[in-house]
Amino acid sequence: MRLRVLLPILFVAACSHKQAPTTWTHTHWGMMPSEVIGAVPEVAPESGSHLANGAVGQFRLDTAGVAETALPAEFFFLESRLVQINFGDAQYRDNAANLKTFEHLAASLRKQYGQEAGAHIMDPAAGLSRDLTWLAGDTQVMLVATPVTGTTSMLSVIYRRAAS
């Protein structure tokens, strides 16, 4: 009897949970900016963050679904071609909280891509610093914790074209 009462409540709760949009998954490496706009109409222009390889952030999503969570996304282009999407809110958070989130994201990515292909855990004296890497076809997926201070860090999930 309890199960018959509980199941409809759980179903309604599950259906009412709003998932973050995952329209970014309609993109692929090498797309031109106009093609990304067509594939992800919700993108907004970005001011132009730069990566070390020279790629420039041209678009952003305020909220995108990735690794069973919702994070802002930034789309990077090199020579007018999509080469990387970064997910993260650039907020500094306490290492203990970020470690918990890191483990949650890692579990989600393992469920999606299998065991990671590479892992690095840096000296704990520097703060929370680790990264995990997966390869999925022509895509490299990275989960990165970057220390800001000894007690704070930032988290990012990065999707980029894998090296040939």
Image (spheres, rainbow, N blue to C red):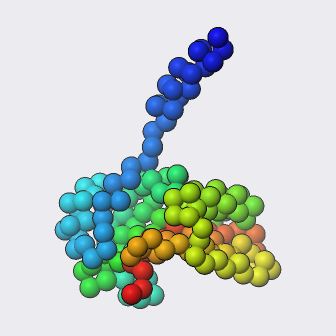
Residue at figure coordinates x 58%, y 62% from the top left: 110
Check the picture and name the quadrant holding the N terminus.
top right
When asked about the image quadrant of residue 24, the answer is bottom left
**Occupied quadrant, residue 72:** bottom left
Q: Is residue 111 above or below residue 29?
A: above
Name the residue located 53 percent from the left edge and 72 percent from the top edge.
134
* Foreground residue among 154 and 48: 154
- Residue 88 located left or right of residue 163: right
Q: Is residue 38 visible?
A: yes
- The vertical placement of 73 against 69, above or below, is below
Image point (38%, 76%), residue name: 138
In the rendered image, the vertical position of residue 52 relative to residue 158, given as above or below: below
Between residue 135 and residue 150, name the one nearer to us: 135
Check the image and name the residue furthest to the top.
1
Q: Nearer the viewer, residue 63 or 68?
A: 68
Q: Does the rendering let one see residue 156?
A: no
> Based on the displayed image, in which of its 4 quarters is residue 40 positioned?
bottom left
Give the position of the C terminus as an image quadrant: bottom left
Find residue 66 and report its horizontal and vertical position in percent.
47, 57
Q: Position of residue 124 (x, y in %)?
A: 78, 77
Q: Residue at x 45, y 71 (%)?
A: 136
Left or right, 150 with respect to 91, comes to right
Residue 61 % position (x, y): 38, 59
Q: Is residue 65 left or right of residue 8?
A: left
